Image: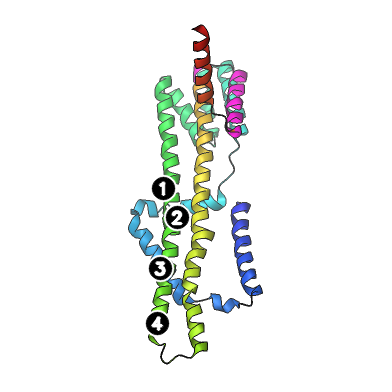
């Protein structure tokens, strides 16, 4: 389990409840079934209306990504690609066929299969890039569901509060001040629920999924570059150095394309 995801949620919930209790509140006042029905039911209904069934079915995958997503070892990927490149150089490209079932990275596995099928470099690159884009879009569609829920939830909280206030104001003539104050506080629990669920669960989950998608895309770019290097028969050491440089550049926020373009422009200016 992802300790940061679970720990962050537990810490946030614990701090909020502790602060409420320290201010003189009681835990029982936070438990309002009708407010929960309005907020959760309204949010679920609005979210179901907003997305097709195929996206709703990805909710389980989304939660798995949030709580059980394994960290991506990009340096390990580079080392693995270098090992495959070394074997291809020593024993021939066809020797990699026996390595396909051993791969736990699906994109590396697919890349080796494409090499074995005899496709040219451009077609291999296009196919792998398309697969990476599909995987990234799949994660973003998961994030979109939770983002939508995070938008609907506070609104449903306001709806619940307004409904509660309508009932309170309807009995204003017969209710005493003590009873009136208690009824108003109960009405505002719906707003609390809406904001709470949106900012502790839905929006952080969506952000975590998009972060995972970004990291996966970066790892996929390394894999694609490595597979193409293996197919071209590049020296494994050179390939490893190149991929490591690209990784360091990404981690440092360096735009390699912009840097290369600037270098070319400088050379062109020098020739002139």
Q: Distance between the residues labelled 1 and 4?
A: 39 Å
Which comes before the other along the chain, label 1 or label 2? 1
The region drawn magenta spans: 231-252
C-beta proximity under 8 Å, tags 1 and 2: no
Residue 8 image position (x, y, % from top left): 61, 56
Q: Distance between the residues labelled 1 and 3?
A: 22 Å
By secondary structure, the bulk of the magenta-drawn segment is best described as helix
Q: How far apart are marks 1 and 2 (CA)?
A: 9 Å
C-beta proximity under 8 Å, tags 1 and 4: no
Disc 2 element: helix
Which comes before the other along the chain, label 3 or label 4? 3
Task: Give me the residue at 44% from left, 68% from top.
Answer: 157
Q: In this view, does 236 lie above or below 42?
A: above
The residue tagged 1 is 141
Query: Pointer 3: residues within 10 angstroms few (<14), some, or many (20+)?
Result: some
The residue tagged 4 is 167
The residue tagged 2 is 146
């Amino acid at each position: 389990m992802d300790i940061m995801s679970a720990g962050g949620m537990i810490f946030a919930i614990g701090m909020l409840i502790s602060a409420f209790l320290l201010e003189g509140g009681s835990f029982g006042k936070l438990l309002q079934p009708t407010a929960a029905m309005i907020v959760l039911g309204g949010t679920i209904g609005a979210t179901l209306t907003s997305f097709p069934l195929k996206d709703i079915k990805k909710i389980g995958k989304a939660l798995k990504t949030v709580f059980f997503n394994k960290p991506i070892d990009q340096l390990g990927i580079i080392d693995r690609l270098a090992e495959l490149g070394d074997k291809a150089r020593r024993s021939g490209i066809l020797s990699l066929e026996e390595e396909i079932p051993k791969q736990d990275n699906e994109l590396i596995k697919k890349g080796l299969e494409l090499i074995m099928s005899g496709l040219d470099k451009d077609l291999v690159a296009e196919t792998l890039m398309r697969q990476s884009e599909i995987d990234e879009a799949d994660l973003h569609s998961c994030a979109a569901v939770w983002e939508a829920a995070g938008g609907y939830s506070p609104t449903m909280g306001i709806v619940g509060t307004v409904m509660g206030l309508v009932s309170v104001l309807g009995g204003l003539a017969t209710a005493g001040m003590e009873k009136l104050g208690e009824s108003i506080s109960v009405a505002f629990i719906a707003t609390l629920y809406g904001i709470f669920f949106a900012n502790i669960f839905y929006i952080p989950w969506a952000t975590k999924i998009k972060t995972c998608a970004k990291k996966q895309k970066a790892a996929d770019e390394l894999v694609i570059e490595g597979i193409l290097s293996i197919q071209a028969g590049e020296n494994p050491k050179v390939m490893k150095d190149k991929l490591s440089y690209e990784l360091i550049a990404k981690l440092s926020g360096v735009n390699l394309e912009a840097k290369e373009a600037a270098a070319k422009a400088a050379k062109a200016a020098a020739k002139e």
